[in-house]
């Protein structure tokens, strides 16, 4: 149980385009989802916390107009990188917390490798 | 803001040797979690510690949470090549159970 999928796994786009990444909890209800960014051989940097049915909470320094987050249902959250630029190239990874379990561990998706040309 | 520091950044050991990674938070934590990320993979939850001074064991892995709930450690006894990966501590505090991750310790095990 507790599987999180992420799509696409890899995307290459031109500078100026927008990219949408989907994060799904497959076998549990994710009241809270988290979006992270990870640079090679570095730690996970929390970008935002997404709660179903409400606005996402962004970490300091993360532009909410650039990284649009929507948590439309208990099993789906999306991250849209708008007007992507080469410096946005990174590994984006989501995680989800099972709101019904009472536990706080996070289950991570496999990540999305974004390359902006 | 809250910071979680983790050392060492990288360690390589001979198979059979022990390994320890240490984690320190700038603030008191409600809980600390440990995750393992294999090369090319995603973080996988290992354990959560909640109580002051708590010690938990998983086979060859021993996890400790400090008395002040600001530091933690993960010790692996007699490492095996399957232990290879990056071990992250993550401190929990505040609302929505968000986690602040340490920088991770990358473990290499030589047979």
Image: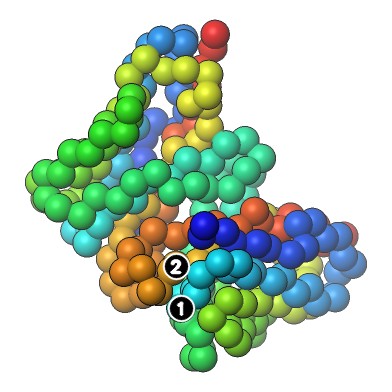
Q: What quarter of the picture does the C terminus of chain B occupy?
A: top right
Q: Does residue B99 appear left or right of residue A94 in this picture?
A: left
Indicate the position of residue A7 as horizontal and vertical percent values.
Answer: 74, 64
Indicate the position of residue A82 as horizontal and vertical percent values.
Answer: 75, 78
Q: Does residue B24 appear left or right of residue A25 in this picture?
A: left
Q: Camera-side residue: B9 or A78?
A: A78
Q: Looking at the image, do the residues carrying marks 1 and 2 touch, with CB atoms under 8 Å apart?
A: yes
The residue that disc 2 covers is A97
Q: Please tell me which residue is depicted at 86% across the width and 69% down the height of the picture.
A: A15
The residue that disc 1 covers is A31
The disc numbered 1 marks a residue on which chain? A
Q: Where is A73 relative to B104, above or below? A: below
Indicate the position of residue A58 as horizontal and vertical percent values.
Answer: 49, 77
Indicate the position of residue B18 as horizontal and vertical percent values.
Answer: 34, 17
Q: Mark 2 Cα within 10 Å, few/some/many (few <14, many 20+)?
A: many
Q: Camera-side residue: A91 or A16?
A: A91
Q: Does residue B90 appear left or right of residue B12 in this picture?
A: left
Quarter-wise, where is residue B95 in the image? bottom left
Q: Which mark is residue A67?
A: none
Tell me how far mark 1 sits from mark 2, CA to CA. 7 Å
């Amino acid at each position: 149980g507790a599987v999180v999928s992420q799509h696409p796994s890899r995307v290459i786009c031109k500078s100026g385009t927008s990219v949408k990444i989907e994060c799904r909890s497959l076998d549990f209800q994710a009241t809270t989802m988290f979006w992270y960014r990870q640079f090679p051989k570095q730690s996970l940097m929390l970008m935002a916390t997404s709660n179903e049915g409400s606005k996402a909470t962004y970490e300091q320094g993360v532009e909410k107009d650039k990284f649009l987050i929507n948590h439309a249902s208990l099993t789906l959250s999306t991250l849209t990188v708008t007007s992507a630029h080469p410096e946005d190239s990174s590994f984006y990874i989501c995680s989800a917390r099972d709101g019904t379990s009472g536990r706080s561990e996070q289950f991570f998706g496999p990540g999305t490798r974004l390359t902006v040309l | 803001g809250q910071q979680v520091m983790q050392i060492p950044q990288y360690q390589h050991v001979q198979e059979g040797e022990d390994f320890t990674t240490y984690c320190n938070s700038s603030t008191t934590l409600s809980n600390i979690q440990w995750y393992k990320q294999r090369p090319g993979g995603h973080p996988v939850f290992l354990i959560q510690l909640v109580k002051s001074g708590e010690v938990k064991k998983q086979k060859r892995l021993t996890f400790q949470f400090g008395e002040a709930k600001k530091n933690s450690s993960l010790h692996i006894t007699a490492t095996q090549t399957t232990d290879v990966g990056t071990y992250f501590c993550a401190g929990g505090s505040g609302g929505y159970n968000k986690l602040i991750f340490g920088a991770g310790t990358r473990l290499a095990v030589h047979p």
